Image: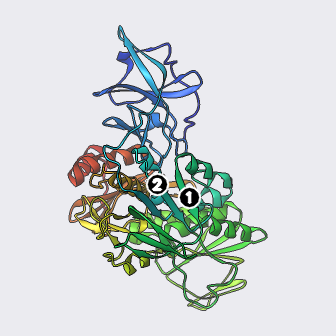
Amino acid sequence: MSDASAVSGPDFTSGVPRSSLEPDIPLLGHVGEEPVILVKSSAGTFAIGATCTHYGGPLAEGLVVGDTVRCPWHHACFDLRTGEAVGAPALDDVPCFRVLESEGVVRVGDKQPVPRRRLATPGPSSVTVLGAGAAGAAAAEMLRREGYEGAVTLIGAEPPGPVDRPNLSKDYLAGTAPEDCVPLRPASFYRDIGVTLRVGPPATSLDVGRRRIALADGETIEYGALLLALGAEPVRLSIPGATLPHVHTLRSLSDARGIIARTLGARRAVVIGASFIGLEAAAALRRRGLEVDVIAPDTLPLARILGDEVGRFVKRVHEAHGVRFHLGTRPRAIRPHDVELESGETVPADLVVMGIGVRPRTELAQAAGLAVDQGVMVNDRLETSAPGVFAAGDIARYPEARLGQPVRIEHWVVAQRQGQAAARAIAGRGAPFRDVPFFWSLHHDVNLGYIGHAPKWDAVEVRGDLAGKNALVVYREAGRPLAVVTVDRDHDNLRAEAALERDGYAGLETFLREAGGQSAR
C-alpha cells in the first residue's frame, strides 16, 4: 500500500499543461504540503485532496466514475466537484480546490467550502435512530448533510457509541492499532452537529400507531420518523462450558477488550468457526503471538461462500502463518483449559473465541407488527410495512436491484450505505437503493475484496494466480456473473463494481471479457 499522504508529483499552484491530463485518470500532485489529485473529465477539471478519509487510501490509484472518484482500498466515494464523501465507508469530506485554466495551463487555487444543502420542506417533526452501529451512525450524519434541521436522536446500547466495527477483528485485535482509533467519532462531534447520542437502556417496545418507543428504563420517546438499525447478535453454541469466563464472542468494543485482556498470559487460543470473523480473529491472535487452533464442521474454510479452490487458498494462507485447523468436526464441550471435540480429541485452550455467525435483532420489529421474513422487510427506499419506519443494515431484507429478489446482507459498507440511503429517504431526497454490495476481509497478508452478491452459484472461474496472491475469481449461476472476489487487484475490484452498478450483469460480463485471462473451474 502506498503512502497517500506523501507529497509527490507537480506543484499544482505553478500549473501543469492541460495536455498532460488524461481523461478520467487522476494526476497526483500537491498544493503546498497537501497531496492533491487533479482530474479532467467530461464534466470539467477538478482538484480534491488525494487521501481517502477512511483509512488513508490513495485516491490517485482509485477509479473515476462520472463526477466521483472511488478509493481502491474500501470503495469510499467522493464528489469531484465538492470533495464531499458521498459514499461510505468514508464519512469525512476531502478538501476541494478552485481550478483555474488559462492558455492551456491548469492551476489549482484556494480551498472551497462544501456547499450546504437545505430541504425544500421541513421533513418529519423528529427522527429517532435505534441502533448506533454502521447504519445508524451513517444515517444520523447524512440527515444533517442533507439539510434536515429537526431533532435527531441516536440510541445505542453499547458504549461508547458508534465504533469502527471491522477494526475490532483486524488491527485493533491484532494490537497494531490503538483503541483511540476505534470510535468513529468523539462524543463532541454529535453535539456539534445537533444529534443527541444516547448510550444506555435499549428499546423494549415499539408502537408504530402512536409513533412511540419504550426504553428499558421506563422512558418513552416519540418520533416523527424512525430508523431501525439494530444490527445482529452473535450466536453462541449451547454446549457445556459455552459460558465460561474465557469464552468470548466478537461483536462489540467490549468483546474485543475482553479477548485482548484474556490474551495476557495466555498461550493457546481456540477459534470455533471458520467464518470471516473467526478467521480474522485467528490471524489477529497469531499476530499477538498465541498458538491458534480453528475448529469447524466444514471441510474447507469459507468454501460455502467462496468455493473450494479459494477455500483451500485461504486455508494455506493461515497454515503458512501457523494456524492449525480441525475441520469436519464440532466441539462437544469447553473446559477451563481445553476444548473437547466430537471425536474425543482435546485441544488445549486458554482462550476461546466463537465465530459461528450472527442473527438479526428483529424481535422489536416483529412484536410491533412489522413485516418480518428472515429480516425486516423493506422496499427499495428501505421503508418498512409501517409508514415512516425505515430499516437498514444487518436487520433489513431489501430488494436487490440486479438479483431481482429480497436479500439480507451482513456487510459493514452495505450497512453504512443503507443508513445513508434511509436518511435521504427520510429527508425527502430518497431514490431506490441500488448500491453494489462490497466487503473486504483481511487474512494475515492477504486482503480479499468481494463485490456483488451470490447467494448460490454453479460455476467458479479463477483468473490469475491464487498461490501468487494475485487473482480475480468469478461466481456464476446459469451463466450470469453474480459476484467477483479479488486478491491484490484493487483496481479490478473497483472496475467490476462500476460495471455491475452501471449495466448490471451484462456490464460485469463486458468487464470480464475485457479483463480476459479466465481459467474455468
Along the viewing direction, whichever of 390 and 509 lies nearer the viewer:
390
Residue under the image location 22 percent in, 64 percent down: 404
Q: In the rendered image, is residue 440 in sight?
A: yes
Along the viewing direction, whichever of 204 and 394 lies nearer the viewer:
204
For disc 1, the neighbor class at 10 Å (few under 14, some 14 to 19, many from 20) is many
Q: Give the SS element for disc 1.
A: strand
Where residue 268 appears, as percent x and y from the top left, is 70, 74
Where residue 2 appears, as percent x and y from the top left, is 55, 38
Q: Earlier in the sequence, mark 1 or mark 2?
A: 2
The residue mark sitting in front, 1 or 2, is 2
Q: Amino acid at mark 2?
A: Ala
Viewport quadrant of the C terminus: bottom left
Position of 436 with respect to 302 (left or right) is left
* 366 vs 444: above or below: below
Q: Give the SS element for disc 2.
A: strand
Along the viewing direction, whichever of 179 and 10 lies nearer the viewer:
179
- Image quadrant where residue 290 sits: bottom right
Task: Kindly identify which residue carries mark 2.
Answer: 151
Residue 197: mark in rendering: 1
